[in-house]
Image (tube, rainbow, N blue to C red):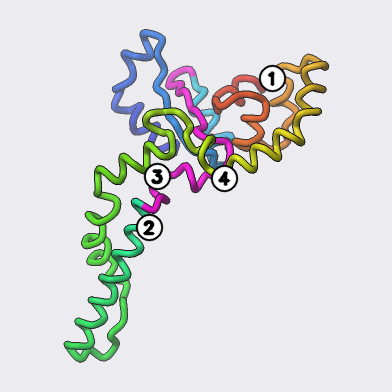
Amino acid sequence: MIDILCTLDETQIFDEDRENGVKPLMLVDGHGSKFELPFLRYISNDAHEWTVVIGVPYGTALWQVGDSPEQNGSFNMASIAIKKELVEQKETMMLHSPTIEAYDIMTIVSRTWYKSFDRINSNKKAIAERGRFPYNRNLCNTSTQIINYQYVSKQEARSRIKKSRDEGKTLEEKLREMKRFTAGKLFNVRSCRVGQIKSKI
């Protein structure tokens, strides 16, 4: 992830925006890699600061468009048919070992790509269902997995939230108390900006 940001920064495409006080924004899933110190240091560096926002607190795989039925699911279904076709061709040619070999991967990927990851309309649907564009965090309202997790978390967290409010703890104090950062913990302290972790501790 750092390499991607570094490459973008080297192109200087955001320099003018930064000079005008507008930082580039990256919308990401809640994978633990977004809370590792090298990443936090990079996005918080004044020379190339980024605003990084977590899309949903739980269900990283649900948030990733590539894991959607429209993309990954379609790819898997299409690849099964193509693998079967390849094996049948090898059997027809009476090859000694009519199996899928490592060199077959390029054929499989190139023939299944346009049936899955390259379909614009279904990709737009997958993006919208996840609330990435338009950005509305749709999964937080429609995913049973996330709703149930949030419900349990809210019920268990009510007393802690009230207690911390009564004690007057700030975001900075709450972040300092965390022994390990996760997307869920960040949301529980009413924040979704990853860069705040580094800047507050």
- Quarter of the image where one finds residue 169: top right
Q: Check whether the beta carbons of the residues at disc 1 and disc 4 lie within 8 A of each other.
A: no
Disc 2 target residue: 73
Q: Secondary structure at mark 3?
A: helix
Q: Give the spatial CA distance, label 1 vs label 2.
A: 42 Å
Q: Secondary structure at mark 4?
A: helix
Q: Give the spatial CA distance, label 1 vs label 4.
A: 32 Å
Q: Check the image and report above or below for 173 versus 38.
A: above
Quadrant of the frame with the N terminus:
top left
Q: Give the spatial CA distance, label 1 vs label 3.
A: 32 Å
Part of the protein shown in magenta: 46-69
Q: Check the image and report above or below for 44 versus 126.
A: above
Disc 1 target residue: 172
| Kind of residue indicated by mark 2 | Gly
Which of disc 4 and disc 2 is earlier in sequence? Answer: 2
Does the magenta-highlighted stretch encompass residue 22? no
Q: Which label number is shown at residue 144?
A: 4
